[in-house]
Image (spheres, rainbow, N blue to C red):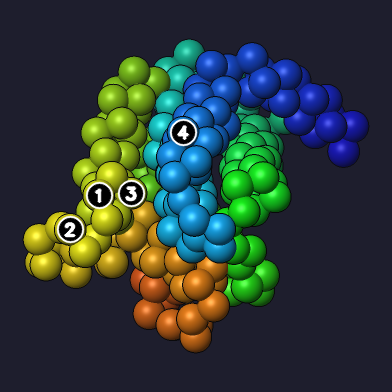
């Protein structure tokens, strides 16, 4: 336990110094503040979009880049020769990335609801969507980390995956302004399902099970793919 605590402390320091962690916190917050002046009180759109973006940046960009870089540098292989197993490092990293995503979401909620006057969400619905959405987007990142040959490749693939998923998910253009077929398809992407479920939580609509089921399926299926294909070195 003491070894894991020390490992968590070291990884926390490294994460705090990582520029990507700062971007994941500040970019969605900047977008929220930049466009927040034009939203009406009780808005139910902008905060769910920014929240989905924050979780997506951590899951698709920061997580796979970090894990693939550790494998590329031989850190996971060297850990296999110590009392700290490589799986412990992965578990610590996943936990820290979840905490980072939670901090980003907390900032967005505080600014969006507390400062800009956006409508607060239905807590249980929003919590379920965030848990499943984080699991789904992190599972995409784990697949990228498992298959990418190095950190640079994971970074590139994560960025390339983020923008199409963000567009289809309705983060770059309102779904009602998109071609109907793309808007419909976007609801079955991880970002689209998360944004839609969060929008329902913010708007007070009845809980629609389909987006939550989509997120759960992504989380389970892609986690299994990542576990099967992950290479330690």
Mark 1 or mark 4: whose residue is earlier in sequence: 4
Helix, strand or loop at label 1? It is loop
Q: Nearer the viewer, residue 208 or 45?
A: 45
Q: Which mark is residue 171?
A: 3
Task: Locate the C terminus and report the quarter of the image it occupies.
Answer: top left
Image spot of residue 145 (x, y percent): 40, 35
Task: Say which residue appears at 21% left-offset and 64% top-offset.
Answer: 176
Say whether residue 224 is visible.
no
Tags 2 and 3 in contact by the CB under 8 Å rule? no
Mark 2 or mark 4: whose residue is earlier in sequence: 4
Disc nearest the viewer among 2 and 3: 2
Q: CA distance from mark 2 to mark 4?
A: 21 Å
Assess disc 1: are there few (<14), some (14-19) or many (≥20) residues with their C-alpha within 10 Å of its C-alpha.
few
Q: Which mark is residue 34?
A: 4
Q: Which mark is residue 173?
A: 1
Disc nearest the viewer among 1 and 4: 4
Say if 73 sits above or below 193 in the image.
above
């Amino acid at each position: 336990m003491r070894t894991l605590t020390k490992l968590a402390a070291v990884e926390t320091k490294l994460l705090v110094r990582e520029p990507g962690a700062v971007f994941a916190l500040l970019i969605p917050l900047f977008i929220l503040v930049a466009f927040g002046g034009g939203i009406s009180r009780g808005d139910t759109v902008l905060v769910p979009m920014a929240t989905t973006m924050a979780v997506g940046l951590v899951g698709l960009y920061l997580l796979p880049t970090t894990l693939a870089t550790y494998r590329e540098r031989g850190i996971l292989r060297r850990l296999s020769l110590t009392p700290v197993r490589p799986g412990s490092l992965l578990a610590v990293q996943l936990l820290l990335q979840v905490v980072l995503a939670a901090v980003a979401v907390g900032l967005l909620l505080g600014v969006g609801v507390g400062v800009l006057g956006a409508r607060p969400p239905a807590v249980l619905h929003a919590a379920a969507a965030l848990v499943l959405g984080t699991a789904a987007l992190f599972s995409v990142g784990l697949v990228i980390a498992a298959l990418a040959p190095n950190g640079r490749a994971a970074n590139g693939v994560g960025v390339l995956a983020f923008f199409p998923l963000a567009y289809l998910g309705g983060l770059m253009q309102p779904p009602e302004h998109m071609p109907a077929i793309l808007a419909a398809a976007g609801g079955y992407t991880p970002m689209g399902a998360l944004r839609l479920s969060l929008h329902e939580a913010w708007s007070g609509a009845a809980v629609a099970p389909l987006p939550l089921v989509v997120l759960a399926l992504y989380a389970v299926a892609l986690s299994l793919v990542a576990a099967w294909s992950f290479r330690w070195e």
